[in-house]
Image (tube, rainbow, N blue to C red):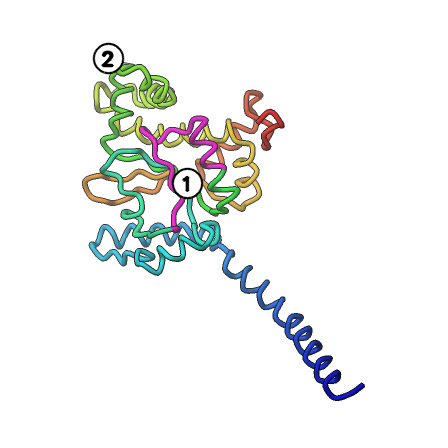
């Protein structure tokens, strides 16, 4: 073999060896980029972010031009660490109250933070495809949707546009449960309790409709938590972390729960 041929072979071998050495490094880099914090770590991040917001010390992370460029070229699944279901109320600025930025949170906003079909599908996407380890069902004080349903249950409600009743009908069981738990309370005094019960109703409705979510929670890959945001102070009250597991157990025993996690060919 003459010298030029030897040189060519040497170069090819060198490139091949470089690729062999580089491939594991690239794979490792991708794995590190896609790795998400454990659910309890994410919950701590959310709590710390809210405390900064309340203290007036928000860091406003991931809100610059660099992050925008990342958003234009990278997958949100490599970054988002929590899915949040919240009310559409303008007093509940989700990213701000958690001191989070672009691609940090996968947010579903709907009046009354209900978990009906559209919301359940959005949540499934956030948990199973964006791969967020935590789901927060976030209610808030002075919720107009819960107040309207409470007034309707009391017989003091007013006429609503045609598409609002089917939107908020998921809230009615929460209001009635709050009334049964607090028979000594009357009128609007029951509303704060109904707001809490509405968070748990959302969790139950989600578990009933979403086998995929149940599987993720049961496996420990996802943690579901309930919380109430105070629109006047900015502070989040984190509800009993054991409650979603109790609700999951109840739903698992129900013959009415959905059982097919994956959509059929007709979908």
Q: Residue at x 47, y 47 (%)?
A: 132
Q: Is residue 255 left or right of residue 244?
A: right
Percent x, y of residue 240: 39, 39
> 12 or 248: nearer the eye?
12
Measured along the vertical axis of the image, is residue 200 above or below residue 220?
above
Residue 152 lies in the magenta stretch? no
Expressed as whole percent of the image width and height from the top left, the position of residue 6 reads 74, 84
How far is the residue under mark 1 from the one under mark 2?
34 Å
1 vs 2, front mark: 2
Asked which secondary structure carries label 1, the reply is strand
Quadrant location, the N terminus: bottom right
| Image point (20%, 54%), residue name | 56
Q: Which residue is mark 1?
A: 225
Outermost residue toward the top in this view = 155
The reply to whether dot 1 and dot 2 touch (C-beta < 8 Å) is no
Q: Residue at x 47, y 51 (%)?
A: 75
- Give the left or right position of residue 214, taking residue 158 as reference: right
Counting residues from the start of the chain, the first of labels 1 and 2 encountered is: 2
Q: Residues within 10 Å of mark 1 (few under 14, many from 20)?
A: many
Quarter of the figure with residue 151: top left
In the displayed image of the protein, which residue is found farthest to the right?
A: 1
Return the residue at label 2.
Answer: 159
Range drawn in magenta: 103-124
Which of 118/142 is in front? 118
Q: Position of residue 9 (x, y in %)?
A: 73, 80
Is residue 57 visible to us here?
A: yes
Q: Is residue 104 magenta?
A: yes
């Amino acid at each position: 073999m003459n010298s030029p041929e030897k040189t060519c072979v040497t170069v090819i071998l060198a490139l091949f060896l470089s690729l062999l050495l580089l491939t594991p490094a690239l794979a490792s880099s991708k794995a590190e980029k896609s790795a998400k914090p454990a659910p309890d770590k994410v919950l701590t991040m959310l709590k710390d972010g809210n405390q900064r917001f309340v203290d007036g010390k928000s860091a406003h992370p991931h809100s610059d031009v660099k992050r925008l460029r990342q958003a234009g070229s990278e997958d949100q699944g490599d970054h988002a660490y929590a899915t949040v279901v919240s009310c559409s109320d303008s007093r509940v600025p989700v990213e701000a109250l958690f001191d989070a930025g672009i691609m940090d949170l996968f947010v579903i906003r709907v009046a009354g933070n209900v978990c009906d079909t559209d919301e359940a599908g959005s949540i499934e996407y956030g948990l199973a495809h964006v791969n967020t380890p935590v789901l927060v069902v976030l209610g808030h004080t002075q919720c107009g949707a819960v107040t309207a349903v409470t007034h309707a249950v009391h017989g003091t409600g007013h006429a609503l546009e045609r598409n609002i009743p089917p939107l908020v009908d998921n809230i009615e069981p929460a209001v009635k449960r709050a009334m049964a738990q607090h028979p000594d309370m009357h009128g609007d005094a029951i509303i704060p309790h109904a707001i809490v019960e509405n968070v748990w109703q959302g969790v139950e409705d989600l578990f009933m409709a979403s086998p995929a979510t149940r599987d993720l929670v049961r496996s420990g890959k996802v943690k579901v938590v309930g919380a109430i945001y105070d629109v006047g102070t900015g502070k989040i009250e984190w509800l009993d972390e054991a409650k979603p597991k109790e609700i999951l157990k109840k739903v698992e025993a129900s013959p009415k729960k959905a059982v097919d996690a994956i959509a059929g060919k007709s979908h």
